Image (cartoon, rainbow, N blue to C red):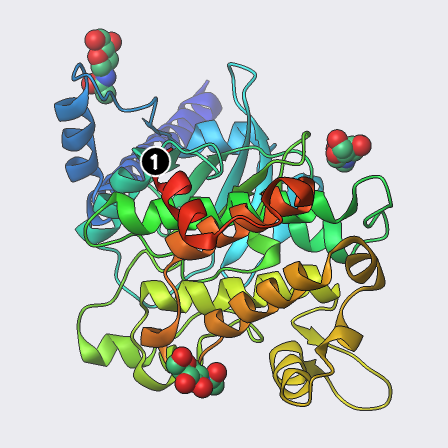
Amino acid sequence: MSCSGVSVGVFLPLFMCFWLYLGLQKRKLIRTKQMFFELNGGLFLQQQISNYNGTSTGTGGFKIFSKEELEKATSNFAADRILGRGGHGIVYKGDLEDKTVVAIKKSKMTEEVPTKEFAREMFILSQINHKNVVKLLGCCLEVEVPMLVYEFVSNGTLYQYIHGSRGLDSDTGFHTCLRIAVESAEALAYMHSSASPPILHGDVKTANILLDDKLTAKVSDFGASKLAPTDEAQMATLVQGTCGYLDPEYLMTCRLTDKSDVYSFGVVLLELLTRKKALYFDGPEEDRSLVLCFMMAVKVGQHQDLLDSQVRDEMRIEALEEITHLVMRCLNMSGEERPTMKEVAERLEMLRRYHHHPWAQADANPEEEQSLLAME
Ligand SMILES: *[C@@H]1O[C@H](CO)[C@@H](O)[C@H](O)[C@H]1NC(C)=O
Ligand SMILES: *[C@@H]1O[C@H](CO)[C@@H](O)[C@H](O)[C@H]1NC(C)=O
Ligand SMILES: *[C@@H]1O[C@H](CO)[C@@H](O)[C@H](O)[C@H]1NC(C)=O
């Protein structure tokens, strides 16, 4: 009797302490989540969404996800769910409760403090509806580094398509590449012109151009540059991007512009034309820059040798010269001299049509064509 009295006397307080401890931990967890949510601009975003809710533009189904939802969708971020790893973080494949398949981007920790600016950019990106831009479906803010939820694009990246083993076969051919180039250029042009200030990509490369089951291009990862820094101190530490694609002017000034995207897109075009990587390995030397090799070859008039043999066979010589000229303009050292993304898209579209029906425009005058395009 006294024995159980003792054990109750000992265990009851212990049990209550434990229970209290659990309760406090849970409260702390909820408070932490709420803190991150607010730090990441969650309240602002919520307000924006409800403001737009019911208006004719709608929110396009943009959703703020809870941490648990995303953990469940990815089986707790299991390794076999990983779709890819990039400089910015890891992308997981997720299955939402309503059976939607999504790609969830979990960024690496950064030292920057998340801001309301982030939420604002998220909101702008969520409003974008373009068939060649990967749709942003939502985000999760109650974690230290926000996670982004995108539509899932099934058929890999343009990088894999060009350089991978399944590669380009003769029945896909260069006209598919040209179409993908047009679509990507249109997506970038659209983003540059759709908002003010323009939405810049900041990391245009073939690994960021996804392909769906019909090989339609979908540009992903807009706003790698999302926290477009405003003060100088921040800027110096924030030059991001990928070696081989980086605009040299951006490196010098640390100021990302729409023309930085144009430069990087020039490298993408070169990759399509040569089927070499932006930094490629060639014999005993170390990596070589595709841009430098190409520029040197153009200087001595031997750039045709660098082109992929299938491209050389399929494209007419005048189209090749035209596209080479366009690439060189995109790669000009001075951003001001580069064409806009809109012009690049229009020129590529003309080339694509020409490639399809060379006879139809054999003697068309380029001025006339421009106006035809403008009227569409
Ligand atoms: C948006 O409006 C619908 C009904 O019009 C409502 O069911 C939904 O909860 C609203 N969403 C938000 C985020 O306010
Ligand atoms: C990618 O698309 C091509 C062409 O539609 C198709 O043949 C191929 O099976 C697809 N690959 C994957 C991995 O979905
Ligand atoms: C850049 O463009 C200007 C004007 O078209 C041209 O004179 C210059 O040679 C170009 N520079 C390079 C490096 O291509």
> Vertically, is 118 above or below 26?
below
> Vertically, is 222 above or below 252?
above
> Vertically, is 255 above or below 145?
below
Near-viewer residue (240 or 26): 240
Instruction: Tell me where residue 171 appears, x and y as whole percent.
Output: 84, 39
Query: Which residue is identified by label 1?
Result: 375
Near-viewer residue (287 or 83): 287
Tell me the amino acid under the disc marked 1. Met
Tell me if mark 1 has few (under 14), some (14-19) or many (20+) residues whose alpha carbon lies within 10 angstroms of its own. few
Please state, as top left, top right, bottom left or bottom right, where the C terminus lies in the image. Answer: top left
Q: Is there any visible trace of residue 221 in the rendered image?
A: no
The structure residue drawn at horizontal position 66% and vertical position 50%, both measured from the top left corner, is: 158
The structure residue drawn at horizontal position 61% and vertical position 57%, both measured from the top left corner, is: 206
Where is ligand 1, by quadrant?
top left
Q: Is there any visible trace of residue 92 in the rendered image?
A: yes
- Residue 307 occupies quadrant: bottom right
Q: Secondary structure at mark 1?
A: helix
Instruction: Tell me where residue 209 appears, x and y as whole percent.
Output: 57, 49
Q: Is residue 315 left or right of residue 327?
A: right
Q: Is residue 91 left or right of residue 370?
A: right
